[in-house]
Image (cartoon, rainbow, N blue to C red):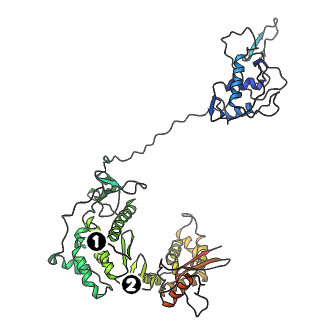
Amino acid sequence: MIGSNLFSCGPARSRSKLSPSYLAVVPLLKGVIYRHSDEVELLLEGEEPDTISRVFAAPTPTIKTPLRRMTVEQVKHLLQDYDSQPDSSDDTDPPSTKREPPTPAVPPDPGADPPPNNKKQQTKTSVAPTGAETTETPTSEEPTGAGTIKTERKIYRPPLKSKYRKPELADDTLDGMEALFTNFGSSLRKATGPLPPRDDLIKFDANLHDTELSKNIRWHACPEEHQPAVLSIIKDYWDVFCAKGIRRHIRGFTYMDAGYWQIETEEASRDRLAFFVPNGKLQWTVMPMGALNAHAVFVAMMAVLQEEWLAAATKAGLKQCGSQVIVDDILLWAASVRVLLEFFLIVLNVLQKYRATLKLKKSQFITLRCEFVGIDLVPGGRSPAQTKYRAFREIPSPASFADLRMLIGMFGFYQTWLQNNEVRISPWRKLQSLQPKPGSVSIFDEAELLSAHWDNACQELLPELKEEILSGPVLARPDPNRRFYIKTDWSRLGMGAVLLQADGSPESKKAEARERAGGRCEFERSRTQLRPRPIAFISRRTT
């Protein structure tokens, strides 16, 4: 493909007076002009790009610069003049002979005469007297240096057919379901219409379920004045808490490949979840853990349920309440116990509608200290979970690079509570970079390498970080309705910052109000004045 407006030409001349370059170019232009806007786009069929570029860059006697531009009208005029002029070549050529002008590989001599005809090179045999040698002398009718350019032939390679065959599945008819999260596939599906009322609810029976209730309920630090109300709710929604309900499928959802125990699998997908036992082969009818998309599908389903109970809470007029869901852990919060219990009833109603269940043994109700994903929620803020204290106390010095990665990751999870954590553990990071490539050395050589570089500085840092976690630091819980402050510092080795917010004392609130009205910040002006509470510590290495 040659770009538009390639070259410009001079006054039209007869074909016999055209230069050799034009004789080679003009026949290639015939039938290959395409109109593109107000310009010309030339496609030289059958020619290689290097041939085209050499032809169009050849200078001519009349134009001293390389051929560059030609408009639509100039091309048409040149072609009409070329066809209308008689051929000045050999008059004895029959009219039906087709002219095939050569494509010069090398630009011809500007001073050379035009070729008399377009015939291909012929050979002439001369007969010599007896005893003389017979020779063949070429009689070429082409300009000197003319000829065709041979290009390498491309080898045809047919596409290989894939030997992989997808497993045969039943026809996908949706059957009253609609795909959720269509941007990420259509594996998880939800019923399109409203679910019918349940007729299989498990009602609490004291004679049948008292033993199970007393065995599984955990009051923890729930205040005694709230225990009767919580117990009444559990009995009213016993279908959500009982062990028998766990063995039934969640309704309204279906999944094609994998998921968790209560989500039913499609009939056509159960072959993918087959496994062997000593007496044969079995298939999962519900989604087990460990399948490829189990985690993602369960999270997607919980997102749908959370959206429904939040909408129901808004419709009921509940304010200052909410929920946090991480996989199968649910945290409910509210500004008062009354609102919290009303919100709890709405969540249970949604779970009961879809036949989802909760494990009573793991549930905590209205406690002053609640653990959620490794963090203890206390009235004053957030703290590292006390259940992790024993693990921190028993952490030994790393014996392998895998242990070192575990050590860095464990303290990294709680780096929000550790000042300048990344800067302080830089010796561990440098030591981690010495790890050999997997399989290059034995585990014993790897342990010796780590032991040789684990110096006193690395060892002294370990109990220091342990003590900071075990001291139970409490970070303030952020309030989005109040002002935030950030304090930073940096050096050649690293940079650090701390996110701050004023406490709830009357003095802090008055100072914050004066600052919001246009006054200056009154926090940390001196050691005796107001000091905000830290929310999170941040650190990064710069080397």
Question: Which residue is disc 1 drawn over?
Answer: 348
Q: Helix, strand, or loop for circle 2?
A: loop
Q: Are marks 1 and 2 in contact (CB under 8 Å)?
A: no
Residue in the foreground of this view, choosing between 512 and 452: 512
Q: Is residue 162 above or below residue 198?
A: above
Rendered image quadrant of residue 69: top right
For label 1, the SS is helix
Percent from the top left, x then y, of residue 162? 45, 42
Q: Quadrant of the N terminus?
A: top right
Specify few, some or many for label 2: CA neighbours under 10 Å numbering under 14, 14-19, or 20 or more.
some
Alpha-carbon span between mark 1 and mark 2: 23 Å
The answer to whether any part of residue 62 appears in the image is: yes
Q: Position of residue 145 (x, y in %)?
A: 78, 25
Query: In the picture provided, is 277 more to the left or to the right than 101?
Result: left
Q: Residue 337, percent across and down?
A: 33, 82
Q: Which residue is mark 2?
A: 369
Marker disc for residue 249: none
State the count of labels.
2
Residue at the outermost right position: 111
Q: What is the quadrant of residue 324 in the picture?
A: bottom left
Closer-to-camera residue (514/443): 514
